[in-house]
Amino acid sequence: MFLKPSHKVNRHSPRLTATWVLTVILVLVANASAQSNIEIELARKTYSEVKIAVLPFQLKGAGADLGNLGEETRGILENDLKISEYFSLAERSGFADLAAREKSTTSADYSAWNDLGVQWLIKTEYAFDSGGKSFIFVFRLYDVVNERFLVGKRYRGSEAHRRRVVHRFADEVVAQLTGKRGAAESQLAFVSWVGKNKEIFLVDFDGHNPEKLTNERSVALNPDWAPDNQRIVFTSYADNNPDLVMIDPNGNNRKILLKLPGLNSAPSWSPDGKDIALTLSKDSNAEIYVLTKDMTLRRLTRHFNIDTSPTWSPDGKKIAFTSDRSGTAAPQIYVMDAQAGDRKKLRRLTFNSSYNDNPSWSPDGDRIAFTSRVGKRFRIKIYDLENSKTYPFTNGAGSQEKPTWSPDGRFIAYAHQEGGRTQIYIKKVGSKKPPRQLTFLSKGASSPSWSRRVQR
């Protein structure tokens, strides 16, 4: 799309990384085996946030910074780090004098920053091409505590991709701390009203750039991302039947996959991107099938009660689903073999509520989030597959439904209904902080689906 390999910023351990939308040039990678004494145990319920300072961006070369782009981009990066919940931002006023003295982006006065209580430090320089239509950003990350340079990244791109560049570097910062990339570069699909119709929308992880994806002019429901993030399937009533439809995330190449009489709904893409599990009612009852890559159907459930809402395990060997086979109008969560279906023994996961639905398998494969009725409200709960225990995830006012995991497994997004309005919220697993409202659309938002991890 754009970007040519550029020069290395220094001579230490250069390494090229693969790209998806952007080409990324690795400037410097610190020794991968080296460990900082700032550690976060991901399995713990509580953790300390790393205090990080993001210095003012340094404009290099000729040209003016029209619209104060440097400060705006700095704010995007700070926000990404804040909502990751791994970092607390050092107050700008607290280090303004030191930042003004330390103009060099290739070194850091570790002692001075340490005296201010800063643990990590980011320095950035940027420039524009002669026409001002593309940019270059060079980010450098320093570990103040251990007095070492951690990593540098250089990005070149167009203005349309500036936010994505920042999100990508923020994910790299999280990876340097935890060993796993963050979710800043991800997107969520969801459903919202457009007049009297429902359409599929997309929004970034930080809540920016909400945009309408589909133009069904009818009812579109239950979006689900392909593992490569290049396709989204959903159910559309545009032809007066709940059909299975596929579309690109740029809104192009709409294609009807299934148009069987009755339901073609609740699609769930397999981890390898070859198959889609879904609910069909062509047998006069809601049953779960798999639509294979060669467009053949393989039936998984055979029961006179309703079976729906399939979700794949990350290894593709199991499928969790909802069924009221234990009692009519009392749906529960079950797990079945992805090949044999319910012809093999099922594992029932839920027992302590008369209504459980919308299972969502975590990317690490160890947990399943789902909707559960608690009293007169709906809550999100998490079932731990290793210890066979269920834990509450949401509480408070309103109801919460339809959970979906972030690609790094650290967050869950869900639909929060309160006061007659539904919006998408995001909450970090194990965090004591309140959830973050993601959408603010006047018509509301529901049925979130998180994009999958981008392979690089």
Image (tube, grey):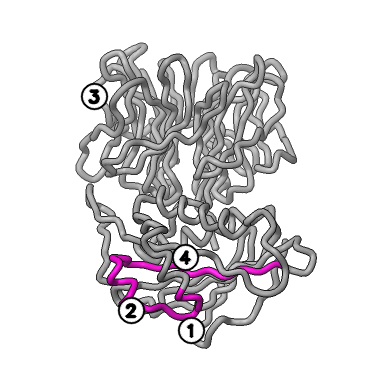
Question: Mark 3 falls on what kind of element?
Answer: loop
Q: Alpha-carbon distance for marks 3 and 4?
A: 52 Å
Tell me if residue 316 can be seen: yes
Q: Residues within 10 Å of mark 3 (few under 14, many from 20)?
A: few
Question: Mark 1 falls on what kind of element?
Answer: loop
Within the image, what quadrant is residue 25 found in? Answer: bottom right
Q: Residue at x 41, y 74 (%)?
A: 150
Q: Is residue 362 above or below residue 308?
A: below
| Front of the two marks 1 and 3 | 1
Q: Residue at x 26, y 20 (%)?
A: 353
Pick whichever, 251 or 441, lies toward us: 441
Q: Alpha-carbon distance for marks 1 and 3?
A: 54 Å
- Which residue position holds label 3? 351
Q: Is residue 330 above or below residue 412?
A: above
Tell me if residue 341 can be seen: no
- Which residue position holds label 1? 13
**Residue range (magenta):** 101-128
| Front of the two marks 4 and 2 | 4
- Which residue position holds label 2? 147
